[in-house]
Image (spheres, rainbow, N blue to C red):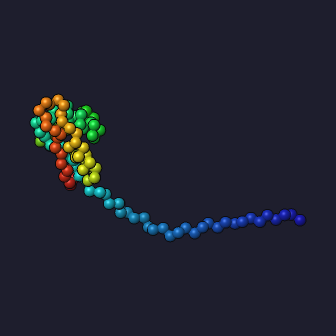
Amino acid sequence: MADSLSVAVQTPCARPDRRPESRERPKQQPRYHVVLWNDEEHTYEYVVWMLRDLFGHSPEKGFLLAKQIDTQGRAVVLTTTLERAELKRDQIHAFGKDAFVTSCRGSMWATIETAE
């Protein structure tokens, strides 16, 4: 007499009901611009150095932004979330004097505005 092996037959588990996939995208946080303003107390070198140090901009991009600030009075240096924009604005305000200008009284001025 042959041994009979009992084979367990597994039935696939029933899958829990899945929600239909939503086509809605998650809401994105509002975006804000960090705006750097022109003044006569800071050199291009200072602006390029600051933008590289705080934002990681290349020297070329820093120079283009410095030129825009000088000729147009302001430039958007970053667009991001409100929390990060506030941090970057505060870092600009705390960056310190321009070592290239002896009469410099402090850091550059930056503001935040909504990106529309």
**Residue 17 appears in the rendering:** yes
- x, y (%) of residue 71? 11, 38
- x, y (%) of residue 104? 13, 35
Identify the residue at image location x=23%, y=46%. 90
- x, y (%) of residue 75? 17, 43
Q: From what the image shows, is residue 108 above or below residue 2?
A: above
Instruction: Say left or right for 87 vs 107.
Output: right
Instruction: Say left or right for 41 vs 10.
Output: left
Q: From what the image shows, is residue 58 above or below residue 1?
A: above
Q: Quadrant of the N terminus?
A: bottom right
Identify the residue at image location x=86%, y=63%. 2
Dividing the picture into quadrants, the one containing residue 116 is bottom left
Dividing the picture into quadrants, the one containing residue 100 is top left
Instruction: Say left or right for 15 vs 86.
Output: right
**Viewer-nearest residue: 17 or 57:** 57
**Residue 78 appears in the rendering:** no
Q: From what the image shows, is residue 81 above or below residue 107?
A: below
Identify the residue at image location x=24%, y=34%. 49
Identify the residue at image location x=13%, y=30%. 102
